[in-house]
Amino acid sequence: MQTIKIIQKNNSFNKLNLIFASFFFSIMTLCVKKIDNRIPIYELVLFRSIFSLLITSLIIKKRNINPWGFNKSLLLLRGLLGTLALVCIFFSIRNMPLNISTVIQYTYPIFISIFACFLTNEKIHKNVIISLILGWLGILIILNQKDLSNLNYELNNLAILIAFIGAISTAMAYILVKRLSKTEEIFVIINYFPFVSIVVLSPIVFLNWITPNIIDLPWILGIGIFTQAGQTFLTIGLKNLPASQAASINYLQVLFGSLWGILFFSEIVNINFLIGALFVLLGTIISTSKNLKKNLL
């Protein structure tokens, strides 16, 4: 009984970390949306990565941690998936209403459940099937072109596709973070993300460099600060909490994203968005539902 209480207390602490992560990530999306469109997406990701690498490297050096970790292949793969996810997320934020891009991004818990079934060779549970139906129904309701045209929203298929690629990449990165957290230091996992991003994106950025305006600098700095904060809280929260359960908590970012869209960009949240978001949320809850006993095994 005492063991269960301790685990419940630890779970509450980890869930609190994930709530903070959702809030900081939502502030990051606000910063991305505020930056002049002439600055390329990959340049923003590079700025974010340089900031994150400097901060995390200092922490690793201060704590005398081996920066290269043990499972280098998985760490590199996590970095690649994180880079792809971030580029897709930034693209969708810039080219779609903030509330809609956030909802699509947060279909990733459903993808986590699907990938977990295949990676563990388990049968696809009925909960996953139900969550898929609810999730995609919700997305179809939100992306109803006739309804969006009444709100003067224009979405192209490329933006929608890239948003879903971002969600899928995020799901795969989550699974890797959860697996790596069993053997790797938290800040080593975090450090590989910006390290890989810098290696991959530097040639592209330098060949297509656009100098930011002084007005853009606070928002660019905000991307670095709030993404780093969100990534730290996220990794700590994932370390001792089931990835699927953690993902459902992170759905709070949809609430935050919708709020910033209304306050800063005059986005309208209509009945279709509310119904669709509710379906996606229900699908997420169903796909990630686990009882405490199963979590203790």
Image (cartoon, rainbow, N blue to C red):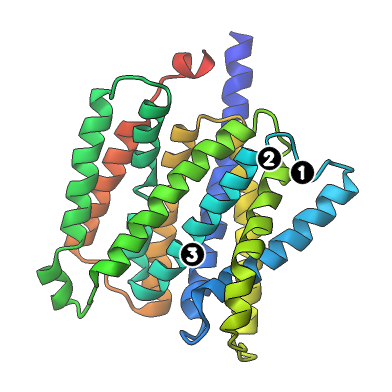
Residue occupied by mark 1 = 68
Q: Is residue 34 visible?
A: yes
The type of residue carrying mark 1 is: Trp
Query: From this viewpoint, is residue 103 visible?
Result: no
Disc on the earlier residue, 3 or 1: 1
> Which residue is painted at 41% across and 56% down in the image?
166
Q: Secondary structure at mark 1?
A: loop
When asked about the image quadrant of residue 104, the answer is bottom left
Which tag, 3 or 2, sits closer to the chain's start? 2
Which mark is on residue 72?
A: 2
Residue 49, by quadrant, is bottom right
Q: Could you give the CA–CA distance between mark 3 and mark 2, rounded to whole angstroms?
A: 23 Å
Q: Secondary structure at mark 3?
A: helix
Q: Is residue 251 left or right of residue 43?
A: left
Q: Is residue 224 left or right of residue 93?
A: right
> Cα distance, mark 2 to mark 1?
7 Å
